[in-house]
Image (cartoon, helix red, strand yellow):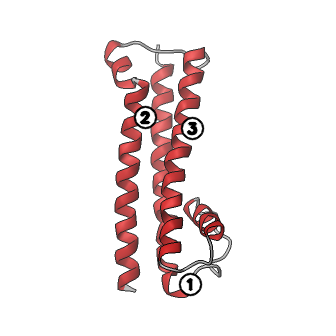
Amino acid sequence: MIAELLLATCMVMVTVSIHAAGLYTLSRLLGFEEMEEAKEHIHPLSWRGIGATLSVTLGLFVLHGIEIWLYAFLYLGIGSVEDLRQAVYFSTITYGAIGYSDAAMAEEWRLVSAIEGINGILLIGWSTAFFVTLIARMRRV
């Protein structure tokens, strides 16, 4: 159990660090801080607003994808699942807290996948807060 908790804790720290860097990068690439400081606002339904919304959405999907694949590679590396497809599928449904069964996971590593579910919920929530904040900034007049 200690090994599972240590491994899961390391994965949480890695994915939170990746997520923080990714959100910071997305924010900088889209220049929302500069727009805020300059009091320049864009209408959400303008071409620029739609482009920004789609860019953020795509960026968030990529960011979560990276984190899901890291867990999938971990599951493969520790031998808790049979193949890459199963690892990615299991990681995706676990990260999204959908879950179907942990039967695909080796029993001695199931705690890691349970913590992945909690980690995923937190990171998805963080992304949602980020997305809502950016949209709110665009809507200010």
User: Residue 16, image x and y in percent?
Assistant: 38, 55
Marks 1 and 2, the one that precedes in the sequence: 2
Q: Residue 40 shows which numbered tag? A: none
Mark 1 = which residue? 106
Q: Is residue 132 above or below residue 21?
A: above
* Other residues around mark 1 within 10 Å, as few (<14) / some (14–19) / many (≥20): some
Q: Amino acid at mark 3?
A: Leu
Secondary structure under the numbered disc 3 in the rendered image: helix
Looking at the picture, tell me which residue is in the foreground, 77 or 59. 77
Q: Residue at x 40, y 72 (%)?
A: 8
Question: Which circle's residue, 1 or 3, is located before the other in the chain?
Answer: 3
Q: Image quadrant of residue 94? A: bottom right
Answer left or right for 42 relative to 7: right
Between the C-alphas of marks 1 and 3, the distance is: 33 Å
The reply to whether dot 1 and dot 2 touch (C-beta < 8 Å) is no
Please name the residue that numbered disc 3 is placed on. Answer: 58
Which of 84 and 68 lies nearest the eye of the viewer? 84
Q: With 114 as the anchor, is 86 left or right in this view?
A: right
Q: Residue at x 55, y 17 (%)?
A: 48
Amino acid type, callout 2: Leu
In the displayed structure, does residue 123 sit left or right of residue 20? right
Q: Where is mark 2, residue-wise?
A: 26
Q: Is residue 68 above or below residue 52?
A: below
Report the residue that reaches farthest toward the right.
Answer: 100
Give the mark nearest the N terminus, 3 or 2: 2
At mark 2, the secondary structure is helix
Amino acid carrying label 1: it is Ala
- Tell me the element at label 1: loop
Which quadrant of the figure contains the N terminus?
bottom left
Quadrant in which residue 82 is drawn: bottom right
Please report contact status of discs 1 and 3: CB closer than 8 Å, yes or no.
Answer: no
Q: Which x, y percent locates residue 118?
A: 48, 64
